[in-house]
Amino acid sequence: MKKIFTVSILLVLWCYGCSKKQNTGLVTNKAMVVSARIEASQIGSDIMKKGGNAFDAMVATELSLAVAYPFAGNLGGGGFMVYRLENGVAGSLDFREKAPMAATKNMYVDSLGNVIPNLSTLGAKAIGVPGTIAGLLEAHEKYGKLPLREVIQPVINLAVKGVVVTKKQANTLKNYKDIIVQTSGDSTYFAKEIKEGDTLKYPKLAATLKIIQQQGKDGFYKGKVAKSLVNLIQKHGGLITKEDLAAYQAKWRKPITFNYKNLHIISMAPPSSGGITLEEIMKMIAPYPIEKYGHNSTKTIQVITEAERRAYADRNYFLGDPDFVHIPTDTLTNDEYLKKRMHNFSFEKATPSTAVSHGNIQIVESNETTHFSIVDQYGNAISVTTTLNGAYGCKLYSDDLGFFLNNEMDDFSSKPGVPNMFGLTGAEANSIAPQKRMLSSMTPTIVEKDGKLAMVVGTPGGSTIITSVLQTILNVYDFNMGMQQAVDAARFHHQWLPDEVMFEPNGFSKNTLDTLKSKGYYINENNSPIIGKVDAILRLDNQKLEAGADKRGDDAAAGF
Ligand code: GLY
């Protein structure tokens, strides 16, 4: 009997070892970058190998993504960075785009009060004042080690040498070619046919980067580059002026921090909705033993879905730019409030979203953001999510400067109650005002365990960002997965409205979905072939770093 017992235990341990071994990401000793493209991860890693730190690598990685991944990597967009220094001090930087000074609350609404289709998503009127360069240079100035010249040079070299188009990239470019031509004209760089294996060189972008390398922030927000940008935007009917560019400032913000079981989570504060919504969801989930229910079991999906439903109802109603609206953060994240919020949840039956107010309003956001995670050899960690909003932003490409411009104005609620491109319904708190930042779902996040750095995580995915970050953290800490396994696992998403649970196709058993249907959940497996593209780093028990580079994209890790 004893022998059988021992053999069984060994068998279980062996099988567990096998499943852990499957899907292990790159493991390195000291430093790592995980991003949407190997070129960007490698350049970021090389910068650290030369003695640079995570903040130097941030500049190099983000700018390399603008070269290698113009789908979302950008100079013409904005984003957020959450950091944790080697001494444990945490903070965050907001370089989200802003509404131009000439923006008005009803700029996307016609005389009858109806939202004008495409005006906030396509073309120059959709552009928010870009924040990426201000953010990168602000972070570099405060925490960088290497001179800007050294950090930007490899990116200039990459732009000159060019980048080979991957299969996924060729497919996306094919899908978006007509709309890019329609918006930017038929003679820009992206108007031509681009095939897998082609090498795309960016001499104009290299020249723009050289100006930034020499002149810093002013090289983008003033002078020649600013003039060219304003001319292009105004020629296409946009509102951004040289005063808008000159006035842009990135902003250091206190991150959202909270505990979940034995973890300490550090995430992004408003104007990102990420941190607060993640906190609400995790605190609503915490009382339920999901680790016993099992990964992606019916009960686990129910608990997570119902917490998401309630948190997104709050998100859509209360959140906006904290420089313009009061956000009741303490109330929304209060333990008692969140306990009460789950009072009407039952395992027997789905709660209809109509029974979970706030209001009849919807918000819309885009999927095509990008995220990268970095840990350096000194122990600093940064989590950076940046975006053009839609794929190739508003599809307006500056041939003169070599980059696309964002369509971030669509992340405002153009009209309270009308859903945005992510189907999110927004409220007054996120209405348009001059110089205001639009609400975001970007959730760059860092996890601490026992007071030490444990994970760096984030993803693109519009409204699904928050729930993808959530599931990745739960996969590791509640369901005992390694980093790559946690990233690979099938994901689902609920956002209050529309009242449906989105599932990645073929990732969930028919039995589970049928049981959920029988309990009143609306199942949608058609809308989203992929939910999120998570790029994350896990500090292992032996202090090494394991990458989770999402197989859903061309994402890759590099390090040493
Ligand atoms: N545009 C996507 C986001 O900010 O969440």
Image (cartoon, rainbow, N blue to C red):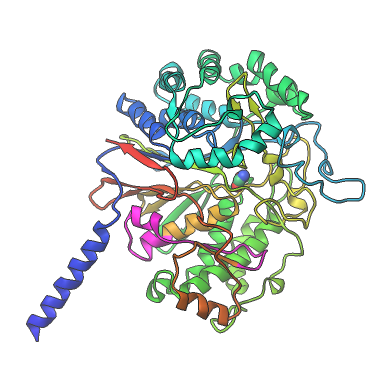
Q: What residue span does the magenta drawing correspond to?
A: 474-500
Residue 165, x across and y down, in percent: 45, 33
Residue at 56% x, 55% y is 464
Q: Is residue 386 above or below residue 274?
A: above
* Quarter placement of the C terminus: top left
Residue at 63% x, 24% y is 188
Q: Is residue 436 left or right of residue 143?
A: right
Residue 550, x across and y down, in percent: 41, 49
In magenta stretch: residue 21: no
**In the image, farthest residue toward the left:** 3
Q: Can residue 2 be seen in the rendering of this structure?
A: yes
Q: Is residue 1 above or below residue 338?
A: below
Residue 97, x across and y down, in percent: 65, 36
Residue at 71% x, 44% y is 410
Q: Nearer the viewer, residue 325 or 62?
A: 62
Residue 382 placement: quadrant: top left
Q: Quadrant of ligand 1?
A: top right
In magenta stretch: residue 498: yes
**In the image, farthest residue toward the bottom:** 1
Q: Can residue 394 be seen in the rendering of this structure?
A: no
* Quarter placement of the N terminus: bottom left
